[in-house]
């Protein structure tokens, strides 16, 4: 893979004035979502909705965790996945959540859970061959294109031989025409523009099996569901719409700081776009995107 080169047509212009939210300050990070109370609430909604979409399952890798095993959750945020897993395994199993920002860490985790600041692209050297299971979910708006192979190699390094990695990512919004959905048309253009400008790997879900194999993993498996957005898709569709609207509200500051990429010219225009999307997704059936869970094993030898 080659480093991203910015296209002239998406080059950032002068920042647009707006009321910003709180964002992480990890050096060099491209992560686009905030670290505040509304984001914590959105992540809780997202966890519940994704769990419901897969019949309440959160562990797909065929691993039976034993007393001396250790679990790592990278990009943990508020630790929702690992806290959930902790309720169903031996309480002596040591679990670690790592993230580049601590503001979302849970305030009073169980004694067998530890949360620490750090990046999946540079895990501690002393963690080599330590973990039986590593989990990571939805870093599509965090890792740049060349950082994905780096992250997978780091996960491979810190897994025990025979250990499992479980990743989950969403496909991007599909570029194309959306009859009767002008806001969706704008969204797909904006999503691609910001992703390209920041060097993000918006197509990482499509390439994940190959990247896992390239990192040395074997027995790569997947399971997917369509994330349907809008009241037309029932209660889960309404919840998924609320979650994705929250994501789009969350990336407003990075978009406006970059000048709107020629797609929005003011905070008011951005807010109107999101409000329009909210209505479109409810009123026009059919908006969806794929969510894929991947799991793979580090060979014993």
Image (spheres, rainbow, N blue to C red):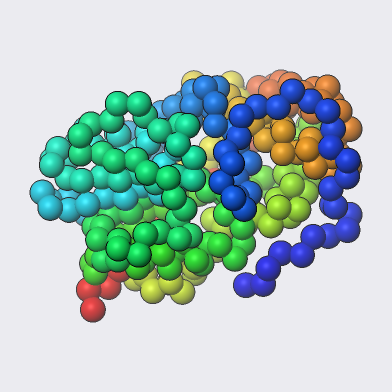
Residue shown at the point (76%, 53%) measured from the top left: 197
Nearer the observer, 94 or 263: 94
Residue at 10% from the left image edge and 49% from the top image edge: 67
- The C terminus: image quadrant: bottom left
Q: Is residue 41 left or right of residue 112?
A: right
- Residue 103: tell me if it is visible: yes
Of residues 232 and 93, which is closer to you in this image? 93
Which residue is pictured at 78% across the width and 38% down the height? 257
Q: Quick check: 47 above or below 151?
A: above
Q: Quadrant of residue 39?
A: top right
* Residue farthest along the left direction in this orientation: 67
Quadrant where the N terminus sits is: bottom right
Q: Position of residue 266 (x, y in %)?
A: 86, 28
* Residue 193 in picture, x, y percent from top left: 78, 49
For this view, does 135 lie left or right of residue 133? right
Q: Position of residue 267 (x, y in %)?
A: 81, 25
Residue 185 visible here: no
201 left or right, relative to 196: left
Give the answer, above or below, for where 215 lies relative to 109: below
**Point 40% across, 33% down: residue:** 105
From the viewer's perspective, is residue 153 above or below residue 205? below
Task: Pick whichever, 130 or 55, lies toward us.
Answer: 130
Instruction: Tally the numbered discs.
Output: 0
Horizontal side of residue 245 vs 222, given as left or right: right
């Amino acid at each position: 893979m080659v480093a991203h080169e910015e296209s002239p047509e998406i080059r950032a212009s002068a920042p647009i004035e707006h009321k910003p939210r709180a964002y992480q300050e990890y050096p060099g990070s491209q992560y686009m979502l905030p670290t505040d109370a509304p984001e914590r609430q959105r992540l809780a909604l997202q966890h519940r909705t994704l769990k419901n979409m897969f019949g309440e399952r959160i562990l797909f890798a065929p691993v039976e965790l034993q007393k001396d095993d250790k679990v790592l959750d990278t990009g943990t945020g508020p630790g929702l996945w690992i806290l959930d897993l902790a309720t169903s395994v031996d309480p002596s199993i040591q679990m670690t959540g790592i993230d580049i920002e601590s503001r979302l860490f849970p305030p009073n985790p169980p004694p067998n859970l530890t949360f620490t600041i750090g990046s999946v692209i540079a895990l501690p050297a002393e963690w080599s061959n330590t973990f039986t299971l590593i989990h990571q979910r939805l870093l599509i708006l965090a890792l740049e294109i060349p950082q994905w192979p780096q992250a997978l190699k780091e996960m491979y390094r810190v897994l025990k031989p025979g250990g499992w990695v479980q990743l989950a990512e969403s496909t991007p919004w599909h570029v194309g025409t959306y009859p009767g959905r002008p806001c969706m048309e704008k969204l797909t253009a904006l999503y691609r523009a910001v992703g390209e400008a920041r060097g993000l790997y918006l197509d990482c879900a499509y390439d994940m099996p190959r990247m896992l194999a390239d990192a040395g993993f074997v027995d790569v498996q997947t399971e997917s569901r369509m994330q349907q957005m809008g009241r037309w898709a029932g209660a889960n569709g309404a919840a998924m719409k609320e979650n994705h609207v929250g994501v789009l509200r969350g990336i407003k500051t990075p978009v406006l700081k970059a000048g709107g990429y020629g797609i929005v010219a003011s905070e008011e225009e951005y807010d109107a776009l999101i409000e329009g999307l909210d209505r479109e997704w409810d009123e026009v059936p059919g908006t969806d995107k794929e969510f894929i869970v991947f799991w793979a094993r580090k060979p014993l030898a």
